[in-house]
Amino acid sequence: MISKILIAYDGSEPSKKALNLGIELAKQMKAKLLILHVVNTCIESWGIPLNDAINTLKTVGDAKVKEALEIAKSQGVEAEGIVIEGEPSNKIVEVANIQGVDLIVMGNRGLSRFKRIFLGSVSQGVIEQSKIPVVVVK
């Protein structure tokens, strides 16, 4: 039985699709949603102090999670949100394990084959690391 679903959410179109699927699954299964935004701290400085960049990204992440929570709650789904820092695929799996999640739902960013070779893919990293079922939405 699925009682808790983690939605990896960054506000992108694929993550919005993942949120919508997660909401539908939560309604059907009477599950709780955990909406997670990971601020990628594995970024290069953009010409501003790294702490300032991370703080800005956390503020943006908080707003995205708040928006997703409002959508879920408006549809009668119990939900909570978390914004954390770190390498996204590692943190998604870590939070899912700590929180006792039964299913991870996330979007596919659609990186080109070339970019995936050099940058990797968050969804691929989660699939490889997770012992919990993962649904990737295109």
Image: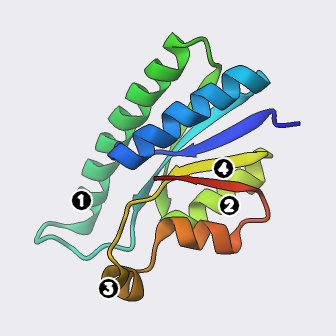
Neighbour tally class for label 1: few under 14, some 14-19, many 20 plus, Cα within 10 Å: some
Question: What is the CA distance from the residue labelled 2 to the residue labelled 4?
Answer: 12 Å
Q: Which mark is residue 33?
A: none
Residues at marks 4 and 3 touching, judged by CB atoms closer than 8 Å: no
Relative to residue 59, is residue 72 depicted above or below?
above
Secondary structure found at label 2: helix
Neighbour tally class for label 4: few under 14, some 14-19, many 20 plus, Cα within 10 Å: many
Q: Earlier in the sequence, mark 2 or mark 1?
A: 1
Mark 2 against mark 4, which lies toward the viewer? 4
Neighbour tally class for label 2: few under 14, some 14-19, many 20 plus, Cα within 10 Å: some
Q: Would you say 104 lies left or right of 70 here?
A: right
Residues at marks 4 and 1 touching, judged by CB atoms closer than 8 Å: no
Q: Which residue is mark 1?
A: 53
Give residue 1's position: percent from left, percent from top: 89, 36
Q: Which residue is mark 2?
A: 94
Secondary structure found at label 1: helix
Res 10 seen here? no
Neighbour tally class for label 3: few under 14, some 14-19, many 20 plus, Cα within 10 Å: few
User: Which kind of residue does numbered mark 3 sit on?
Assistant: Phe
Q: Earlier in the sequence, mark 4 or mark 3?
A: 4
Q: Residue at x 10, y 72 (%)?
A: 47
Q: Residue at x 61, y 66 (%)?
A: 126
Q: Earlier in the sequence, mark 2 or mark 4?
A: 2
Q: Which residue is mark 4?
A: 104
Question: What is the CA distance from the residue labelled 1 to the residue labelled 3?
Answer: 27 Å
Q: Residue at x 75, y 56 (%)?
A: 133
Q: Which residue is mark 3?
A: 114
